Amino acid sequence: MTSEQTILRGSTLPSTEHGRRPRTNEKHRICGWDECETVLSRYNLADYCRVHLPPSFPRIRGVPQ
């Protein structure tokens, strides 16, 4: 055994200058569906809540069957 110790040093997190902040909307928006009073999150960029959001399907690439 050696008497040397291995020291790991981490780096600091990057400042906000280098990173991007998430996109946001204004506060206190309400779902656009009739009779729905759900308050939307600032980070929800859609006009509807998750329950009333129209379904969307991702594009799947591959070999057609």
Image (cartoon, helix red, strand yellow):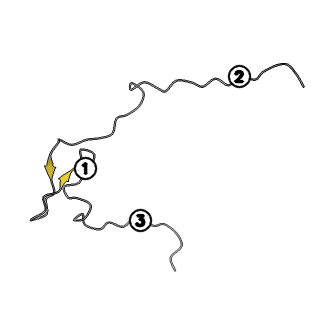
N-terminal of the pair, mark 2 or mark 1, is 2
**Relative side of 39 to 18, left or right:** left
Per the image, the residue denoted by label 3 is 59
* Amino acid type indicated by mark 1: Leu
Tell me the kind of residue under disc 2: Ile
Q: Which residue is drawn at 24% across and 63% down?
A: 53
Residue projecting furthest to the left: 35
Of mark 3 and mark 1, the one earlier in the sequence is 1
- Which tag is nearer the camera, tag 2 or tag 3? 2
Q: For the residues marked 2 and 1, what is the alpha-carbon distance in whole angstroms?
A: 45 Å
Separation of residues labelled 3 and 1 (CA atoms): 20 Å
Instruction: Report x, y in % for residue 49.
Output: 22, 58
Q: Residues within 10 Å of mark 1 (few under 14, many from 20)?
A: few
Q: Distance between the residues labelled 2 and 3?
A: 47 Å
Left or right, 53 with respect to 14, comes to: left
Which residue position is annotated with label 2? 7
Amino acid at pointer 3: Arg
Q: Relative to 29, does residue 14 appear above or below in the rendering?
A: above
x then y, percent, for residue 44: 26, 50
Question: Of callouts 2 and 3, which one flags the residue occurring earlier in the amino acid sequence?
Answer: 2
Q: How many labels does the image show?
A: 3
User: Looking at the image, do the residues carrying marks 3 and 1 touch, with CB atoms under 8 Å apart?
Assistant: no
Q: Mark 1 points at which residue?
A: 45
Who's the residue at 41% across and 31% down the image? 19
